[in-house]
Image: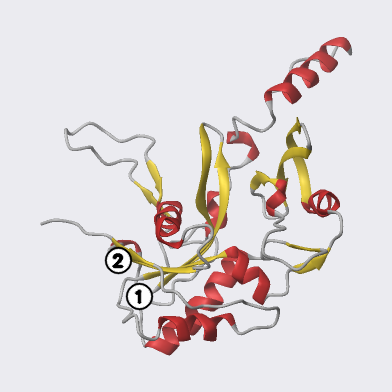
Amino acid sequence: MSERLTVWAPDGLGEVRPGDDLAALVGDLLDGERLAEGDVVVVTSKVVSKAEGRVVAADDREQAITDETVRVVATRSRPGLPPLRIVENRLGLVMAAAGVDASNTPDGTVLLLPLDPDASASALRDALRARFGLDRLGVVVTDTAGRAWRDALVDIAIGAAGVQVVDDLRGGADAHGRPLNVTVTAVVDEIASASELVRGKATGRAVAVVRGVGRYVPAGSGADDGDAPPGGARRLVRGSADDLFREGTSEAYARGHADGAAGLPPRP
């Protein structure tokens, strides 16, 4: 039996403004799309942030980045441009510019990420489930990010509700019977990236539907507390003890040189 994945992005959401009822807008957009049990609705963090009033006055985007920064990972100069800053933001996400966005916002303003993307996803899911009479419906909130081992950008999940966040295959076996000891798949990140292929970056399509991943969309309310499945996207934030890229190479070298000059022992 073959497996099939279908992804599409309806057009016509329009500009979202602070205070708008995003659930109503997305629901209106999806009215003719015949949502089915097991579907996942994907929305960009940009429209979530706009609806939640995360548009803030900031003539200086660099100051806004500083305000949202918890920890600097790496900084690189760029001729003719502000320095590139890779930082950890308030959500624990490591991103360029702390996720602060100055595109498609009024002059003199910037757009911050949602305060709690998992809660935003959960609220949107509750409203859409009630509107369309569905039990098994997932919602993923996405943003764009780079990756430590790869060039270029992809969309990742920064919020999720009603979707199994990871597929933990540890303890199982592959097709040849070999044990799987470390394989944990980031399901919601894969859903986010798939949706970006049909949404695009400059088309104005901020919502997509992913069908064919119903095995990751459980029945019921889908409580998002703690580590109980399906969990929220925050569980994908890597803890410092397991972070092999906690600081940039230049920063690590400079720190090591300073520690050595001060006679300090090597840090873990």
The image quarter containing residue 117 is bottom right
**Residue 231 in the image, given as x and y percentages of width and height:** 49, 61
**In the rendered image of this protein, does residue 62 appear above or below residue 200?**
above
Residue 187 visible in image: yes
> Is residue 267 something that shows in the picture?
no
Q: Is residue 224 above or below residue 136?
A: above
The quadrant the N terminus occupies is: bottom left
Q: Residues within 10 Å of mark 2 (few under 14, many from 20)?
A: some
Quadrant position of residue 264: top right
Question: What amino acid type is highlighted by mark number 1?
Answer: Arg
Residue at the image position 74 percent from the left and 16 percent from the top? 266
**Which x, y percent locates residue 65?**
79, 50
Q: Position of residue 5 (x, y in %)?
A: 27, 60
Q: Position of residue 262 (x, y in %)?
A: 89, 13
Q: Is residue 173 above or below residue 159?
A: above
Under circle 1, the secondary element is loop
Task: Name, please, the residue furthest toward the right.
Answer: 262
Farthest residue, direction left: 1
Residue type highlighted by circle 2: Gly
Task: Answer with mark 2 or mark 1, whichever residue precedes in sequence.
Answer: 1
Q: Is residue 7 left or right of residue 20?
A: left
- Category of crowding for the residue at label 1, using alpha-carbon neighbours closer than 10 angstroms: few (below 14), some (14–19), many (at least 20): many
Q: Residue at horizontal 61%, vertical 42%? A: 239
Q: Read off the residue under disc 1.
A: 136
**What residue is at 67 percent from the left and 72 percent from the top?**
50
Residue at the disc numbered 2: 214
- In the figure, is residue 12 to the left or right of 90? left
Query: Observer-nearest residue: 82 or 239?
Result: 82
Mark 2 vs 1: CB contact within 8 A: yes
Mark-to-mark CA distance, 2 and 1: 8 Å
